Amino acid sequence: MAARRQQSNAARPAGRRPRHSATAGAAPLPAAEAIVEAAASILETRSVQLQQIERSRMARWFFGALFLALLALIGVMTLPYVHAVVIGLIVAGAFYPMLDWLLRRLRFGRQGAALAATLVVVLAVFLPLGYVAGQLVVEAAALYDRANELLSAERVRELLFGRGWFPDAARRIFSYFNMDYTPHRMEALLLDLLRTATSEAVSRVNSLLGNLVDLVVQIAVMLVVIYGMFRHGPNLKRFLLELSPLPEEESELLIQRFNQMNYVTMAGNGIGGILQGGLAGFAFWFLGFESALLWTVIMSILAFLPLIGMSIVYIPASIYLLALGRYGEGIFLFLFCSAVSLIVENWFKPIFVGASVEINSVVVLLSIVGGLSAFGPVGIFYGPLIISLFMTIVNLYHARYASVYNQRR
């Protein structure tokens, strides 16, 4: 058997001989070495990739933290002048069509057009405001002294408890609500109310103009912002578009809505308010009211409020004339101011502004009231601007993002 097995093994071809031998198991196979080397290479490559990913993630976090820190520092530096910067942007946006007209029609250079437009803003806005502010201080002080003279106890007693329709109507109203209508109570209430109001108005104006250095700095910052927008407006717009993470067309839409609201606030409401306040102030001057310029400015500011507007001033003034027995003058003041308000609100503003910004008047009123409560006098501009940008964002959400969010749910 052993001899046959040896013969059969010798007769087999060399290629078919069994691979098992004592020497084959002694050394590693070349294929196994290649597999081990490939696995090691893959692990090393993956380790390098993970390190790069981790380093990139840390770099992104560091970059984001650095960016936010620098942005916060810029905010701290500009916080004392934030109102001046925003108002400067609003004024520049409102007067930007004039700059385009200088560039296209008169073929000014960019720098010359920016200087000319800034000069027009100074002559048309800041110099008149400075003159009016100075006159307001004088008239507010005179009104305070005049109010102290007119609102004496005898004068108030005659007005509220003398003869005439007004005292009789007041007695009926108070008796209907089961309230005491006594001279002592009403005199004290009315005197305190009116004297506090006039004193507050005087102190507000004086505090505004008291810190003259800060006021000059704020105006200088506004002028620099206005000139910078006129001179470098396209570059700044390109910078904002590149910085914004939104698509370019959406960023363009937000900038467009910002400029439209500036035009509506400054041009439409501004000119409309000056018309209403100026005509109503002329009526006050014609009827012999003291401090007609002060009432004109107050009514021009109140004219920014839709629905209510300057009726807060002229309706009590009309009632005051009626209470004095000047019936014709009281009725004339009420009808004239109401007609001016209705014509400007329903004819002038729609034609002058158009349908560029369609926001409900009630929403505009609430936005101005909320802006005044949150930001002070500049809230007249901030409130409608914030609401306009919010409505634009809502429309963009419904048009482009609502379907994406709904699919993820």
Image: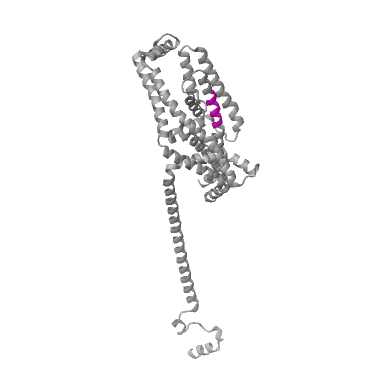
Which residue does the image show at 45% across and 13% down from the upper left? 323
The image quarter containing residue 360 is top right
Q: Which residues are magenta?
A: 269-279
On screen, residue 239 versus residue 166, left or right, reads: right
Which residue does the image show at 51% across and 23% down from the upper left? 281
Q: Nearer the viewer, residue 248 or 105?
A: 105
**Relative to 253, residue 179 above or below:** above
- Residue 234: in sight, yes or no? yes
Give the colour scheme of this rendering.
Answer: one colour
Looking at the image, how many numbered discs can be counted on the residues? 0
Q: Position of residue 271 (x, y in %)?
A: 56, 31
Q: Position of residue 293 (x, y in %)?
A: 49, 25
Q: Nearer the viewer, residue 179 or 186?
A: 186
Based on the picture, tell me whether residue 33 belongs to the magenta stretch.
no
**Relative to 354, residue 39 above or below:** below
Tell me which secondary structure the magenta stretch mostly adopts.
helix
Outermost residue, left side: 184
**Relative to 328, residue 262 above or below:** below
Q: Position of residue 68 (x, y in %)?
A: 44, 50
**Relative to 22, residue 294 above or below:** above
- Residue 367: in sight, yes or no? no
Q: Position of residue 10 (x, y in %)?
A: 53, 89
Outermost residue, top side: 163
Based on the picture, tell me whether residue 271 belongs to the magenta stretch.
yes
Outermost residue, right side: 105
Q: Nearer the viewer, residue 239 or 21?
A: 239
